[in-house]
């Protein structure tokens, strides 16, 4: 049995929506971060599906880049969050409003 | 030393002295005064050396001072007969006045400032005398303006001196505006401001002479030589110390205007010359009348100076610059003598300047009185004294060219003798009329000596044979020119009779009318309206006061409103307010909550998408 392109797009869209809503609604920086990763992976899924459907390697190529960038971003981002927690003993977004004061 | 080096030394000696006094000697008045007098003697010596080594040749030397691309300003000397004559006069009279100041200012607290001022004045004045181009003349012109301002305001704790110095400075700036525009115009017109280059350009093509350049440059003369309508500053300038009045406001600086005209005489077309002749004649008569309304000995002399400057410009306007220079030099001798004599009197009477509070000084101050009398006679044009030769030459020139000018100038001669007689009879004869006058005493030797020397010069200065050949060339040339003019002999007799009648009638008339050593002004007692009219000086100060207070002030208020409301309010504050408003609005978007920024990001993303997709 083969799964059609539409199913992949649907799953990718759902994953992206979950990620976006997570970014918009969650308070914990760590969770927001995970949601961001989820959005990136939703895009990856869509790209792989398109690549398979078209029979070219273009999409796959982009995916490798995105994975690499995401890995680097995680390394930096998690380090920032850890440093933030050390300083403020909190990673909740509504406590991190120093700019408006 | 070559002549150029000597001239440079003469020019820089007073500058160096002034710098030394300003930097080190401001609190050491005695040292400063001797240094300044030594510098004046040095100028004198260098000037005579320069004249000897020049030996009648014209000396030219110039160096670039500023260079902007094609335009360059040079500083240089043009030392010809006119400059040599003026240099000798300035250096010698300046030296005598420096010596006089030693005695006159002996008790002054701020002698360092005073003598430093005299030195910087000598530097500036020599700069004008030697300058070879209009821009250099203008630079030194402003410097004499500054030193005049500084020295008029010497007694800076009196309101009168402070106001007079400001008045002199501001009124002179009005004339200098015209002068400056004239220089720019001349540069545009001739491509140079060098005097000799302009003279040769004009000699090749007389069509280059334009009335507007001449008229604009004349504005500088009107301001500096205190001619109508900018004459109002000179009588007020008498608030300065008396040696300053003698040096700056009688002998040299005010005459610099006339000297400047003589230097640029080749630029003047005949209609501007006629205007100058009439202007000078009008000032000569007007100032002569005004002198009758004054009781202050120095103000009477100031009006006399105005009147004599009028004679000089009349001579220039009649086409005889040499005779104007002649009268300038003789006038410098006897007017410096009169002012120094007045200074000696004021010093002897403990700073009493009202002639009706003097009297009886002839016995108490014999040397001052006799030298003063010589000055009076020279000014009135008594036969054989300096004033006779120069004034008669002017009257002859007037008589040959224009009868109305001749009549007015002769009237001026009558007036001169009258007010000088009034001054002399009342102040020097009769009985002392105040404590100060009854305790008067003859001044010290440093003050009397310059008086005697100047008195000798006032007697012999008019004999043309007295002048060395290389000095008097332009004077000699113009006198010869006048001598050979048609109708000279007849006119000479007329002038001789009228001129002698003038001083006789004036002196005897004032003797009979005012009386010896009178206590009150006879004119004021007998014909008060006439006296009040003369005292009002044609209400020039009132008219200018009205103009400044009522008209100029209103315009200034209007401009100030425009400045405050439009420029400051609308443009400057308005633009700042606008930017501030934008800042306030954008600050409210800055919520500090990360979710807020995410929504803004989304909104911006949607906007971009909508634009890219063509929805909006």
Image (cartoon, rainbow, N blue to C red):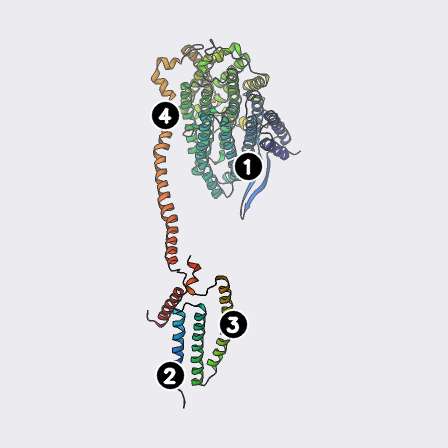
> Where's the N terminus of chain B, which quadrant?
top right
Residue at mark 3 shares a chain with residue at mark 2: yes
Between residue B241 and residue A29, name the one nearer to us: A29
Nearer the camera: disc 4 or disc 2: 2
Q: Given this view, does label 3 or label 2 mark the residue nearer the observer?
A: 3
> Does B218 sit above or below residue B30?
below
Left or right relative to B489: residue B52? right
In 3D space, how far apart are the residues under numbered discs 1 and 4 (Cα atoms)?
Answer: 40 Å
**Measured from the top left, where is residue B572 in percent x and y?**
39, 48
Location of mark 1 (residue): B132
Please report contact status of discs 1 and 3: CB closer than 8 Å, yes or no: no
Callout 3 secondary element: helix
Tell me the distance, in whole angstroms, between the alpha carbons under discs 1 and 2. 98 Å
Q: Residues within 10 Å of mark 1 (few under 14, many from 20)?
A: many
The front one of B501 and B185 is B185
Which subunit holds the residue at mark 2?
A
Other residues around mark 2 within 10 Å, as few (<14) / some (14–19) / many (≥20):
few
Q: Which dot marks residue A6?
A: 2
Does the rendering let one see residue B120?
yes
Kindly identify which residue carries mark 4: B539
Judged left or right of residue B531, residue B22 is right
Is B581 drawn above or below residue B180 in the view shown? below
Q: Which x, y percent locates residue B465?
A: 58, 22
Residue B431's spot in the image, x, y percent? 47, 8
The image quarter containing residue B513 is top left
- Pointer 4 local density, CA inside 10 Å: few below 14, some 14–19, many at least 20: few
Q: Which mark is residue A72?
A: 3
Between residues B373 and B143, which one lies in front from this camera angle? B143
């Amino acid at each position: 049995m083969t799964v059609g392109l539409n199913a992949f797009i649907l799953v990718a869209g759902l994953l992206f929506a979950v990620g976006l809503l997570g970014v918009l609604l969650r308070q914990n920086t760590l969770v927001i971060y995970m949601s961001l990763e989820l959005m990136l992976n939703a895009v990856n899924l869509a790209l792989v599906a398109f690549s398979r459907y078209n029979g070219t390697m273009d999409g796959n190529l982009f995916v490798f880049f995105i994975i690499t960038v995401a890995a680097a971003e995680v390394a930096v981002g998690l380090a920032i969050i850890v440093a933030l927690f050390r300083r403020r003993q909190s990673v909740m977004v509504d406590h991190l409003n120093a700019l408006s004061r | 030393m070559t002549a150029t080096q000597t001239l440079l030394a003469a020019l820089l000696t007073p500058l160096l002295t002034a710098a030394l006094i300003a930097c080190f000697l401001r609190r050491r008045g005695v040292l400063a005064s001797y240094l300044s007098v030594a510098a004046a003697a040095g100028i004198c010596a260098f000037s005579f050396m320069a004249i000897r080594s020049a030996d009648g040749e014209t000396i030219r030397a110039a160096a670039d001072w500023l260079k902007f691309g094609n335009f360059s300003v040079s500083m240089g000397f043009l030392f010809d007969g006119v400059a040599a004559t003026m240099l000798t006069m300035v250096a010698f009279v300046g030296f005598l006045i420096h010596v006089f100041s030693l005695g006159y200012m002996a008790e002054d607290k701020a002698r360092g400032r005073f003598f430093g001022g005299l030195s910087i004045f000598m530097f500036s004045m020599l700069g004008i005398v030697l300058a070879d181009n209009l821009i250099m003349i203008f630079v030194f012109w402003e410097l004499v303006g500054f030193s005049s301002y500084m020295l008029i305001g010497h007694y800076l704790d009196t309101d009168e001196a402070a106001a007079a110095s400001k008045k002199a400075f501001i009124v002179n700036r009005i004339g200098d505006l015209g002068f400056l525009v004239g220089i720019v115009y001349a540069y545009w017109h001739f491509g140079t401001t060098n005097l000799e280059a302009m003279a040769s350009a004009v000699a090749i093509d007389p069509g280059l002479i334009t009335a507007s350049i001449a008229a604009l440059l004349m504005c500088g003369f009107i301001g500096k030589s205190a001619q109508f309508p900018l004459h109002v500053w000179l009588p007020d300038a008498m608030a300065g110390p008396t040696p300053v009045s003698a040096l700056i406001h009688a002998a040299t600086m005010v005459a610099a205007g006339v000297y400047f005209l003589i230097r640029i005489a080749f630029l003047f077309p005949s209609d501007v010359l006629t205007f100058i002749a009439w202007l000078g004649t009008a000032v000569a008569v007007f100032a002569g009348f005004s002198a009758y309304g004054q009781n202050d000995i120095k103000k009477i002399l100031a009006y006399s100076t105005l009147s004599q400057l009028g004679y000089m410009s009349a001579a220039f306007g009649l086409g005889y610059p040499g005779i104007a220079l002649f009268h300038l030099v003789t006038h410098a001798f006897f007017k410096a003598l009169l002012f120094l004599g007045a200074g000696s009197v004021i010093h002897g009477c403990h700073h009493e300047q009202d002639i009706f509070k003097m009297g009886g000084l002839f016995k108490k101050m014999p040397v001052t009185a006799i030298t003063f009398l010589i000055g009076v006679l020279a000014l009135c044009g008594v036969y054989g004294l300096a004033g006779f030769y120069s004034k008669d030459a002017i009257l002859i020139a007037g008589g040959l060219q224009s009868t109305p000018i001749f009549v007015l100038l002769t009237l001026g001669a009558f007036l001169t003798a009258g007010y000088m007689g009034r001054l002399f009879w009342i102040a020097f004869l009769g009985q002392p009329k105040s404590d100060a006058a009854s305790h008067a005493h003859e001044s010290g030797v440093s003050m009397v000596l310059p008086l005697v020397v100047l008195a000798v010069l006032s007697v012999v200065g008019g004999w043309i044979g007295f002048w060395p050949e290389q000095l008097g060339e332009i004077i000699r040339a113009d006198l010869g020119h006048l001598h050979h003019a048609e109708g000279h002999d007849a006119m000479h007799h007329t002038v001789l009779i009228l001129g002698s009648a003038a001083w006789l009638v004036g002196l005897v008339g004032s003797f009979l009318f005012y009386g010896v050593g009178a206590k009150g002004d006879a004119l004021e007692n007998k014909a008060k309206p006439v006296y009040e009219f003369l005292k009002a000086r044609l209400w020039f100060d009132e008219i200018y006061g009205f103009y400044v207070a009522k008209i100029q002030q209103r315009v200034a208020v209007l401009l100030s409103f425009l400045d405050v409301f439009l420029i400051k309010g609308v443009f400057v504050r308005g633009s700042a307010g606008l930017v501030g408003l934008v800042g306030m609005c954008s600050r409210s978007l800055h919520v500090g909550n990360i979710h807020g920024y995410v929504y803004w990001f989304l909104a911006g993303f949607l906007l971009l998408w909508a634009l890219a997709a063509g929805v909006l």
